[in-house]
Image: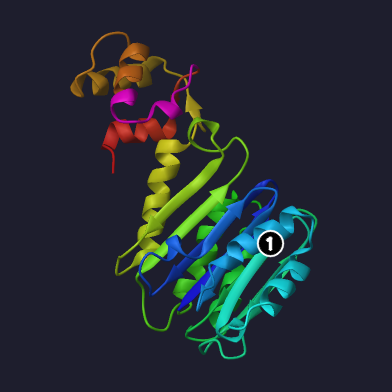
Amino acid sequence: MTFSIAARDGDAWGVAVASKFLAVGSVVPRVVPGVVAVATQAMARVAYLDELERALAGGADAADALAAATAADDGREDRQVGVVGATGAATFTGATCLHWAGGVSGSDDTSAYAIQGNILTGPEVVEAMESAWRAHAGAPLDVRLLAVLLAGDAAGGDSRGRQSAALLVRAPGAGYDAGGVLADLRVDDHPDAPLELSRLHGLSTLYFGTAEEVLPLAGELREEVGRLLAEAGHDGPVEEALEAWAGEVNLENRLSRNGIDTRVLDALRTGLP
């Protein structure tokens, strides 16, 4: 009923998942940076999340921990689970998991992934996801995982259709107030859930990201920004007016003492989504 990827890249860890299933993000993922990223699905055994976290926190290898967890589960042949640890990655698909079902995993010195899916249109879904993982090497993990999920969806995804999707990525110092959450997004019930998740991710990076490309507030640009802020109801010195407007529209994370972030400028020019 589901296709997913659990992965780590550098110090970022995450899971992306989509399914013809209500609120898949409430069941499938577990992410603990430095320890584990898990996706449990098919006839999902939620207890795998705790079991695998404990095993990997205790120093177990991902493959060994997954083998032990599934061996102790009488219902394993109907299940599917992928796990990534500090050492290694592994995926398991039970013999009676709903067709088409399968997965792949891999790791190198800096990253690891476990990709799996069931009730898929065919193996091309997993193949497309693995190709997207490789093609997006070097991108931030949230961007990389979303690309993998969209590739699986474009290749056919869940053979029953679309309903929900989720993206959970954590990294030290990331996200709002440096709280360690790079992305925590769920689409619980939507006819085109993966694309809706992508839309929400765009908003998340806008609102919770920090200044990237900053332009000096000088000359014609300063005059334009001042005029736009006045039209938005914020008169006065440009820097003060910009700070007041950004606080009003929740873009204060993107303020810079060196000028104006290009995404803030675009929002000021065109309006927020």
Q: Position of residue 259 (x, y in %)?
A: 46, 20
Residue drawn at x 67%, y 76% is 70
Quarter of the image for residue 135 reads bottom right
Q: Position of residue 272 (x, y in %)?
A: 28, 39
Task: Report the side of 235 relative to 96 (left or right).
Answer: left
247 magenta-colored: yes
Quarter of the image for residue 58 reads bottom right
Q: Is residue 184 above or below residue 175?
A: below
Task: Report the side of 7 relative to 57 (left or right).
Answer: left
| Nearest the eye: 29 or 106 | 29
Q: Is residue 178 above or below residue 6?
A: above
> Dot 1: few (<14), some (14–19), or many (≥20) neighbours within 10 Å?
many
Residue drawn at x 42%, y 17% is 217
Residue drawn at x 47%, y 85% is 121
| Nearest the eye: 216 or 257 | 257
Task: Report the side of 50 relative to 160 (left or right).
Answer: right
- Mark 1: amino acid: Val
215 magenta-colored: no
Residue drawn at x 60%, y 72% is 81
The N terminus is located in which quarter?
Answer: bottom left
Q: Position of residue 196 (x, y in %)?
A: 35, 59
Q: Is residue 165 visible?
A: yes
The number of discs equals: 1
Q: Residue most toward the top?
A: 237
The C terminus is located in which quarter?
Answer: top left
Start-end of magenta stretch: 246-257
Q: Is residue 85 visible?
A: no
Quarter of the image for residue 103 reads bottom right
Q: Which residue is the site of mark 1? A: 84
